[in-house]
Amino acid sequence: MKESAWLACGILSSLLYAAMNVVVPMWYEGYSLSSQTVSELSAIGAPTRTLWIWLGALYSLLVICFGWGVWKSAGANHALRALGAVTLVNGVFMLYWPPMHMRGAEFTLTDAMHIVWTVATVLLMLLAMGFGAAAFGKRFRLYSIVTMVILIGFGALAGLDGPRVQADLPTPWVGIWQRIAIAAFLAWVVTLTTMLLRSRKT
């Protein structure tokens, strides 16, 4: 398999995850993109749990393939090689994701593990963007920093609503905050992939 094919998995992974956030909620009657979190689509008892798990596994596999592609194409660029390694590790880590319970249910160990997995995944994303910022020039470095700020800022806003989700209280903006953070990262992956594919052609 050519390196360009491995790298193209970066774009495919972002497109898949974006599509998952559009299509899967259609199978969850009453689900609100603005007031409910992405994790609620795979919550224990959610009607979309099985569908999300299978699509999520495919997403993780695409991330793993992309990470491998970045690693193979890094050459002497050590920061890019580190980016590939972190991306690969994150893809493997996301193959299993402890589920949360639906709103209002008793908080258990799996809910706590879900939070740990979320924090760990975000940290790996930030680490990947940090290596990406170091691997390329000033313009991409600035873009990476802006994306990191968006991811942290809107991720924090979504995190503040965590206790309200658990207590089954209104969270009118949590889905929007979370999806802005996710969209920023997905766009960063697409931009990175496009740069890598273009650099191979030149």
Image (tube, rainbow, N blue to C red):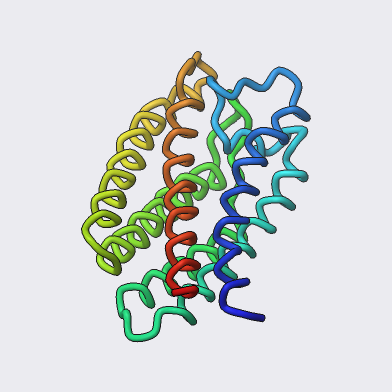
Q: Residue at x 49, y 34 (%)?
A: 179
From this view, report whether residue 105 is shown above or below residue 199. Answer: above
- In percent of width and height, residue 79 lies at 30, 74
Q: Residue at x 40, y 51 (%)?
A: 122
- In percent of width and height, residue 182 lies at 47, 41
Q: Nearer the viewer, residue 20 or 54?
A: 20
- In percent of width and height, residue 49 lies at 72, 41
Q: Quarter-wise, where is residue 94 in the image?
A: bottom right
**Image quadrant where one finds the N terminus:** bottom right
For residue 99, side relative to residue 88 (left or right):
right
Q: Nearer the viewer, residue 101 or 11?
A: 11
For residue 24, side relative to residue 126 (left or right):
right
Q: Residue at x 68, y 38 (%)?
A: 44
From this view, report whether residue 21 is shown above or below residue 114. Answer: above
Q: Quarter-wise, where is residue 146 in the image?
A: top left
Furthest toward the left, the residue is: 138
- In percent of width and height, residue 193 lies at 48, 61
